[in-house]
Image (cartoon, helix red, strand yellow):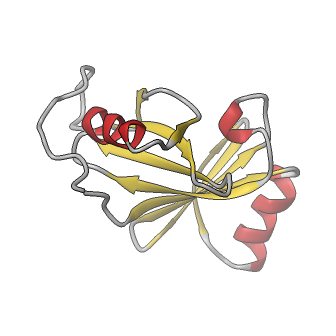
Amino acid sequence: MLGWPGWIGVVSDDLERQRAFYRDVLGLHEREAGEGFAIFEIDGNILELLARSDAPQYASRCVTVGFVVEDIEIAREELLRRGVKPVTGVEGPSEGQYWAYFRDVEGNLFELVQRVSQGASDLPNQGGGMEA
């Protein structure tokens, strides 16, 4: 079963302009920034600004959400079985999570996210995933 989005991403043509808008105009708390990204935290939730790049999931300007799942491998396989078009395979771990990108029927980007404990490097196969 998909969980409520735990992450929202905005792919931007001008990252620094967007960063200034969210930080200085909207007044959001910037938690971290680096080359190609800026992370804002709002009530424990993440809004991440990302620069457009050659990566397929960041190739065009868009807003995307990351749905939290218990087991990303099982959830990804179920989505593929249902005909959902993948953009990437499972990536990570980074920042305590794995992720995989997909497109909906109108081409909008979305993501599955599995959070893992610190120090975990193998994808746990804990069951769960998506229900029909």
Residue drawn at (73%, 56%) of the image: 62
* x and y, in percent, of residue 68 in the image: 34, 54
Q: Nearer the viewer, residue 88 or 41?
A: 88
Q: Which quadrant of the structure image shows residue 34?
A: top right
Identify whether 14 is placed above or below 21: above
* x and y, in percent, of residue 53 in the image: 78, 34
Q: Residue furthest bottom?
A: 26
* x and y, in percent, of residue 35 in the image: 72, 35
Residue drawn at (49%, 48%) of the image: 111
Residue drawn at (15%, 46%) of the image: 128
In the displayed structure, does residue 15 sit left or right of residue 82?
right
Identify whether 99 is placed above or below 48: above
Q: Nearer the viewer, residue 74 or 123?
A: 74
Q: Quadrant of the C terminus?
A: bottom left
Q: Which residue lies furthest to the left in this view?
A: 126
Q: Nearer the viewer, residue 1 or 37?
A: 1
* x and y, in percent, of residue 20 in the image: 80, 64
Q: In which quarter of the image is the N terminus?
A: bottom left
Residue drawn at (27%, 21%) of the image: 121
